[in-house]
Image (spheres, rainbow, N blue to C red):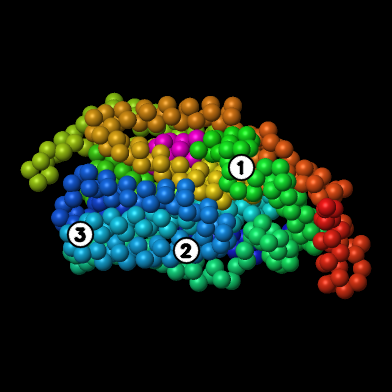
Amino acid sequence: MAIVHSTRVYNWYISMVAASCMVLYGYDASVYNSVQGSSNWVNYFNKPAANVIGAVNTAYTVGAIVAGFFLGGPIADRFGRRWGMGIGCFLTIIATFIQTFAPRHSIGTFIAGRAIIGIGQGIALTAGPIYIGELAPPEIRGKVMSFWQLFYSVGSFLAYWINYACQLHVAKLGEWDWKIVVIFQIMVPIYILVLLPFIPETPRWYLQHGDRVDDARATLRRVRETEQEVEDEILMIREALEFEKEAISSSYSALWKDRSVRKRLILAFILNAGQQVTGQGTLNTYSTIIYKGVFKSQSQISLINALNATFGIIFTLNATWTVDRFGRKFLFIVGAIGMAVCMLAVALVGTKTETIYYLSKGVSKPTKAEPVGIAITFLLFLFIFFYKPSWGATTWIWTAEVFSMNVRAQAVGMASQTQNVANSIFQQFFPIFLANCGFSTFYFFFAINVVLAVFVHFMIPETRRVSLEEMDVLFGGADHVEKGADLLHVEDAHHAVPVQENKGSSIEANEIEVSSAVPTKTV
């Protein structure tokens, strides 16, 4: 039986701490979907109109977009990836209390809390995937990053099951049937804040800020198996940084100066926007409304949402054994085709079966026969089976790994928040789309997924097992490692002087490794 090295175990541990930031996103995305079904929440805020309910959702996305485009990158670059995660978690805790204890009928206070939580999560969701991508070795980077999406499903799982339990005891809980769901959101950010001081910063951040070789080496020794791997990686990072500083730009201006980076940013925008218009973004926000068209009981709908989140965890696990084995491109294409088939089937079942009407409080409401409802539910679960390991997990993996160090934090923040840009735009008109077209709406999602499969086939290169420092070559850019090695007059761009050749004490050996691997430029 193969023995797992202790450094690999530690790498997984610190990656899971960072991935827990995604629990915040998954929980919050499901919270608002859940509380909309609580009559106590509706009454507490004086039965808000449809446009106000939309504003509650929009407040979060606007906050997240602002943070992703203007705050997340600068904070993660200036203060470090850990500080980015910590600040995001702190704001999430503050915003949770604001929402939970908003004064009665003060929907504006609740909306303010939603905006702050969006800012906090926008900051945390920028720093988290960068942290994982910069510490995970290339051969398992995709597998480790797949847990980023898995933890989204964990957050959704927690929110929906807590909501389901509260729905079963509405009479006893009263208005706390929704407040409990909201306040439980502080659990995970507190857990992350407790652990953050005890995990290391990334070596790339240390080398990018003051060329702190000793700190970078200390971090790498905790996550790499051999001293040679540590020295090789330090060498490659320094070479890439040197080229980016000398030949491109050490600032965010490289986002538009470097043609290769521009191309990646556009592709990342399309992939992240595409993730939300597959149909998943709509299911996250409006599954309760969709299921009301086929089921009568609110507790039954809450149970379906909870089961959906549970299966989401199981389905995302498929990414852990497929993403590094078959590659990112394969998962994108297979996932898009599978989702397209599911959306087409939902549209056909929904439009070609009879609609039944029943009276509820004197109002005639449409529904479907129970077998039809079960069929539609099964198809939407099957949709999640295809979505989670592909466009769910792989979009984050691809986005976090393709950018060079000088722009990585800002580019990841901007690209990931394109999800919220697309989501906020589409969710504004989806309820009207659904009200006017019914299940014919799902033909739209079928077409979108077909287009996405074709786009990936022709436009997206495979990034499996490519080191972060050499990613630029895939997109028509220069090899930052090779070019940096030329600037630093290093003979072997990929390997430092073998560690075993160095003699003397450990302190002397370390000094020799740095000086011989990365010679100082002559002026």
* Viewer-nearest of discs 3 and 1: 1
Left or right: residue 311 versus residue 208 is left
Q: Which residue is mark 3?
A: 106
8, 412: nearer the viewer = 412
Residue pictured at 42% horizontal, 49% vertical:
66
Percent across and percent down for residue 80 are 58, 61
Q: Which residue is mark 2?
A: 87
Residue pictured at 86% horizontal, 64% vertical:
512
315, 410: nearer the viewer = 410
Q: Which residue is mark 1?
A: 254
Q: Quadrant of the N terminus?
A: bottom right
Instruction: Look at label 3 and name its amino acid.
Output: Ser
Write the start and end of the magenta stretch as one range.
270-283
Instruction: Look at label 1 and name its amino acid.
Output: Ala
The answer to if 277 sits in the magenta stretch is yes
- CA–CA distance in space, label 3 to label 2: 27 Å
Find out whether the residues at labels 3 and 2 contact each other: C-beta distance under 8 Å: no
Residue 357 shows up from this direction: yes
- CA–CA distance in space, label 1 to label 2: 26 Å
Find out whether the residues at labels 3 and 1 contact each other: C-beta distance under 8 Å: no
Give the total of numbered labels: 3
Element type at marker 1? helix
- The crowd level at tag 1 (other Cα within 10 Å; few <14, some 14-19, many 20+) is some
